[in-house]
Structures are given as C-alpha cells and as structure tokens.
Image (cartoon, helix red, strand yellow):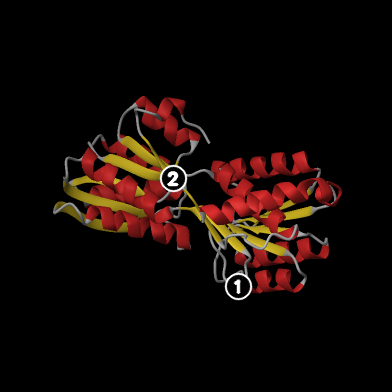
Amino acid sequence: MKKALIALALTTLAAAPAMAQEVSKLKIGMSFQEMNNPYFVSMKKALDEAAKSLGAKVIATDAAHNVAKQIADIEDMLQQNIDILLINPTDSAGVEAAVKAAKARNVIVVAVDANASGPVDMFVGSKNKDAGYQSCRALADAIGGKGEVAILDGIPVVPILQRVEGCKQALAEYKDIKLVATQNGRQDRSVALGVVENMIQSRPNLKGIFSVNDGGAMGALAAIQGSGKDIKLTSVDGAPEAVKAIADGGPFVETTAQFPRDQVRVGLAMALAKKWGARVVPKEVPIDVMPVTKKNAAGFSW
C-alpha cells in the first residue's frame, strides 16, 4: 500500500501543472446520505474548500436517507455532465443502478464513508470495526469489566454493522460482561432518547450503553441523566457536542473519532489521480480512527 500511494503521489505531482487548466473545468458531484448531521456538514465543508482551491465546481445533494431520492439526485448530476461522483450511500446495495449509470458515462465513482455496490473505482472510509471495538473496550473498562450492557443500534448500512461487530468482539473478551439488549435508535437523538428511556426501565441493572453514533448517543445521554442512574456511555464519531460532553465529565466517557474531512479529501485526490491517468490508485483506502476521552477531548476537533 505504501509503495502504491508513493507512486500515486509522484504521478499526481508530475501531472498537476499540465492538468491545471483541465481541473478548473471539473464538475464534482457528491451525494450525501444526509446533511442533518455535523459529521457530513464537516465533510461537505472540506469538499467545498478543496474544490475552491482547484477552481472546480461542486454539485452536492442530500438524500435524506431515501434511496430513491439519492438515485434521482445522481441521475440529475449525470445530466449536468459531472466528471467525478463522490457517493455516500444511504443504502449500499440500493444505489448500484446509479453507480452503473455513472460508469456508463465514464464518470469516476468514489464511495465515501460507506461503500456502494457496483463498479465503484475506489472506496475511502473509516476503520469502523476498529472504532466499535475501541469504544466497547472503553465501555467495558469504564464499568470495571463486569455488568449488563446494551447496544444502541442504527440504520443497517455497512459502517454501522461493522461498528456493532467490533463492539461485540470487544465485549466478548470480558467474561463478566453480559450484552442484554440491542435496540435501534436510528442514529437520531429524539428516537434514541425514547428507546434508551425504555431500555433503562426494562433493565434495572444496566451499567453501560454503546451507541453506534454520536447523534444517538446524545439522546442516550439525556435519558441516562434523566434516570439518575450510574450508566456509562460510549459512541463512535467525534462530533463536537459529544466531545464537549466527554470533556465536561459524567456518563459519556468516550467516543471513537472518525475524520470526515480526511475521507473526502483523500477520496477526491484518488479520483483526480485516476482522471489524470494514474494506474496505481488503491481500490480501498482505510482511514484510522482515534479514541477521544476526558484526557484529550479538550484539544480535539474534526
């Protein structure tokens, strides 16, 4: 991988002067699964900054977790003659037809954050299984390695499934921890609040909760605080609100941060390199994650 990335960098640098004029005419389409989330807002801002530095045009859309809308959005982008499609699928399998349509028009397709079915050129995403594992190790340690815990699940896309898989792997390493519930908070604060309130009522001995994202975690935090119980909480994302809650102390003890800005920057760089003729562009680029706890929360931001 290192050799491939070095070769890619050299190819890109060599091609850059000759391609400067071409880049300024580029149209970059990005289809987000949602934009009502600081994570994707941060990613969109980084994309806009990168495109501005290139003089390229960005067309961005919000699927609002509706795969039919996402497909329609991409079809509209193709009518506008985009050169690069960055897709953050709301349904990995459901967008396959849109990916095929883009490739039929010779558009370079990069899946970002979540992979997509079909002939994507490359995928750039976080190490989600590792993120779930690290968060649930932190949860297990926070409750002293014993007691009942629950998972606040989310929309069944690959990154979420991987986080849950990593969490379960970590919890299995603690013989005195019992996973007693897995319920879906749909990664939404208000939905998660109600789900966790019911969870706490039905599980009086609950000691810890892992949320698959920070949006759900903030709802879970409100439910825990309202219950007055000593229940620890961990999550995945690294959203500003979650980081602040961790820095302030209390039930929320850790979030495993992802780097949305880096994902979209790397995805765009890979697409440009391929457009410029690079033959060693990796098919997949995993982006590292980082635990954020009270020790480092004050200095962390996306």
Instruction: Kindly indicate whether the residue at mark 2 contacts the one at mark 1 (C-beta within 8 angstroms).
Output: no
From this view, report whether residue 72 is shown above or below residue 190.
below
Q: Amino acid at mark 1?
A: Gly
For label 1, count other residues whose C-alpha is less than 10 Å away and answer few (under 14), some (14-19) or many (20+).
Answer: some
Task: Categorize mark 2 by other alpha carbons within 10 Å: few (<14), some (14-19), many (20+).
Answer: some
Q: Position of residue 202 (x, y in %)?
A: 23, 52
Question: Residue at left 43%, top 25%?
Answer: 298
Measured in 3D between alpha carbons, the distance from the residue under mark 1 to the one under mark 2, in whole angstroms, is 26 Å
Q: Is residue 194 visible?
A: yes
Secondary structure at badge 1 equals loop
The answer to whether residue 159 is above or below residue 58 is below
Residue drawn 64% across the image and 49% down it: 9
Give x and y (percent) for residue 165: 34, 60
Q: Badge 1 is on which residue?
A: 118
- Which residue sits at x=60%, y=62%? 122
Image-based side of 167 in relation to 214, left or right: left
Q: Position of residue 219 (x, y in %)?
A: 41, 42
Residues 293 and 148: in front is 293
Return the disc, 1 or 2, that comes first in the chain's sequence. Answer: 1
Element at label 2: loop
Q: Which mark is residue 289?
A: 2
Q: Tell me, yes or no, if residue 153 can be seen here.
A: no
Vertical relation: 158 (above or below) 32: below
The amino acid marked with disc number 2 is Val
In this rendered view, identify the residue nearer to me: 254 or 195. Answer: 254
Along the horizontal axis of the image, is 266 left or right of 14? left
